[in-house]
Image (cartoon, helix red, strand yellow):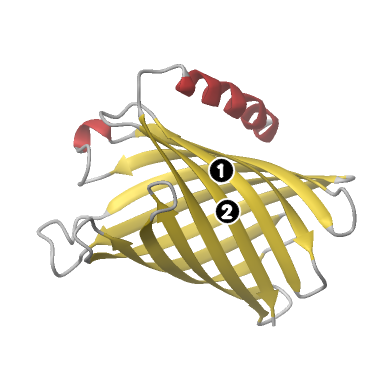
Amino acid sequence: MRIKFIVFLCPLFLITLFCNAQRSKDAGMWATFTIQHPLTKKINLVIDQEFRLKENYQRINLFYTNVGVDYKFNKSIKISPTYRTIQKKRLDGSYSYRHRLMLDVTLKKKLNKITLSERIRYQIEVQDLYTSRKGKLEEQFLRFKTDVKYSLSDRITPYFSCELRYQIRSPRGDGPAYNNGFHRIRNVFGFEYQLNKKNSVNLYYLVQSEFNISTPESIYILGIAYSLTI
């Protein structure tokens, strides 16, 4: 019931956001390379490397590397602890170094050709740990993501996903007045193409909108992700 409700709610929520007050807009590109390696029947090692462009594809935004594991508790539940190191480029050309810990719990249900999933993520992040006055003040969020996938064929799977981010605590940016609230939504349309048993490609278009903050931004992202199982 909860998954159906969120799937119904997210597109309506997005329309409401675009009717809000004026916001800044940007376009960019995200490119991801993923390596997966099964350690046991239930545990997969997952390594991601992502590169992002912003300002209408003209400027580097960031690089990040994920190292984590997927633990399949059963056919319906997956638990994924992950560490991420981020290098975010500043306007002066230097980089801000960030460290993030994430814990995902994913619930999945298959209904014939349709697969529904709900991912709940807790994340905690520090920025410029040893070089910033606020380096040891952690940022905390909860993220709720719903996916709907349809198996069009053995190789092609179109999908839609919607993610809402809930700010628990943020010592940076807009400050404590925005703690304990929702401030961002992501909607993604794309398709996955299975090249063979070990290789797949994911092409998508992402729209992200911020709200209930002083300087909201909307971004429009073209994304490509390649996954290799070894």
Q: Is residue 86 left or right of residue 65?
A: left
Residue identified by numbered label 1: 206
Residue identified by numbered label 2: 223
User: In the structure shown, which secondary structural element does the residue marked by tag 1 occupy?
Assistant: strand
Q: Residue at x 22, y 55 (%)?
A: 91
Image vertical order of residue 124 relative to residue 36, above or below: above
- Residue 189, given in percent of the width and then of the height, sits at 66, 42
Q: Is residue 114 left or right of residue 139?
A: right
**In front here: 18 or 171?**
18
Q: Residue at x 61, y 68 (%)?
A: 70
> Quadrant location of residue 229?
bottom right
Image vertical order of residue 105 relative to residue 70, above or below: above
Amino acid type, callout 2:
Gly
Q: CA distance from mark 1 to mark 2?
A: 7 Å
Amino acid type, callout 1:
Leu
User: In the structure shown, which secondary structural element does the residue marked by tag 2 occupy?
Assistant: strand
In the rendered image, the quadrant that contains the N terminus is top right
**In front here: 77 or 187?**
187
Q: Disc 1, disc 2: CB below 8 Å?
A: yes
Image vertical order of residue 100 relative to residue 4, above or below: below
Give neighbour class at mark 1: few <14, some 14-19, many 20+ (Cα, 10 Å): many
